[in-house]
Amino acid sequence: MPLSVFVIDAFTTLRFKGNPAAVVPLQAWLPDPLMQAIASENNLSETAFFVRDADGVFAIRWFSPLKEVGFCGHATLASAFVIATQQLAPFSLRLRAAAVGELGVERLADGSFEMRFPNQAPALVAAVPQALLDALSIAPQTVYANRQAYIAVYADERQVREVVPDLTRMLALAPRDVAVTAPGSGHDFVSRYFWPANGGAEDPVTGSIHAALAPLWAQTLGKAQLTALQASTRGGELGCRVEGPHVYVRGSAVQYLHGTIAL
């Protein structure tokens, strides 16, 4: 049973930048162990699988090489790109995920996509775990957290770029990952993201964490629309808009590969 597979570079207009995600469109769900095996074989940070339900909503699931994850922004963008370019849906589409509910996606006039995520604003952490402090080579000013990650806030972009993570120590923070962030020089804020317990070392661009970072910086900077840079080696740019219970994350994508999985 051959399956189509796409590899899409998300949050970029250039191949070999942004965050690559594999996307596998399905007519019906495969067994979970098989989807996990495909994601492990792909060995990208995420592989997304989607099935179109009878009501026209695309049910979506995401797998890292290690496990199924509850929410992934860049693979959602990659899936929306595949759905749009394969003409499976018009410019407005809906995706549904068990952990986060319904996600709206709009394809904009410039070809980019805007995704509607639940607002995942973090809370200030009063007692910062020692394992987090030990895992970061530069001490943060403050630390926030939501259910996805600890968010270490720094004074400036230079510190975010220079901080060295101890990935082994970060394993003790599971199931949470670790984001580091600061005001940006050319963007409203910058970040990096580490997730050794859930999929890998440093994630190139993490759409999902911007559902937490955007509300944090919107409150700090006093503005609802923000520009963001994830300062990984590959790098990626995002636009963010905070509106009450929702965070809108905007980005572009480009296709790298279209192939066939032989099962």
Image (cartoon, grey):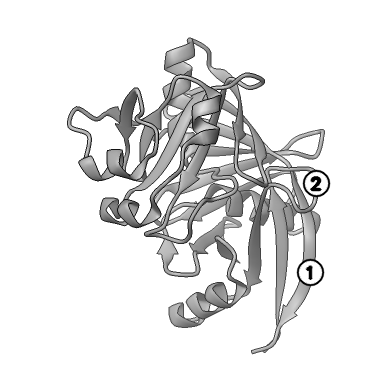
Residue at image position (39%, 38%) is 137
Q: Is residue 83 visible?
A: no
In the rendered image, residue 126, in percent from the top left (x then y), is placed at: 19, 27
Up the image or down, 157 lies above or below 64; here it is: above
Residue at image position (55%, 60%) is 45
Q: Is residue 150 visible?
A: yes
Q: Which residue is mark 2?
A: 14
Among the 4 quarters of the image, the one containing residue 125: top left
Q: Quadrant of the N terminus?
A: bottom right
Which is more foreground, mark 1 or mark 2? Answer: 2
Q: Which mark is residue 258?
A: 1
**Could you say which is closer to the camera, residue 185 or residue 7?**
185
The image shows a total of numbered marks equal to 2
Asked if labels 2 and 1 touch by Cβ distance under 8 angstroms, the answer is no
Q: Is residue 107 left or right of residue 153?
A: right
Up the image or down, 185 lies above or below 77; here it is: above
**Residue type, numbered disc 2:** Leu
**Could you say which is closer to the camera, residue 62 or residue 220?**
220
Residue at image position (38%, 50%) is 166
Q: Quadrant of the C terminus?
A: bottom right
Q: Is residue 133 left or right of residue 46?
A: left
In the rendered image, residue 66, in percent from the top left (x then y), is placed at: 44, 69
In the rendered image, residue 229, in percent from the top left (x then y), is placed at: 62, 32
Of callouts 1 and 2, the N-terminal one = 2
**Residue type, numbered disc 1:** His
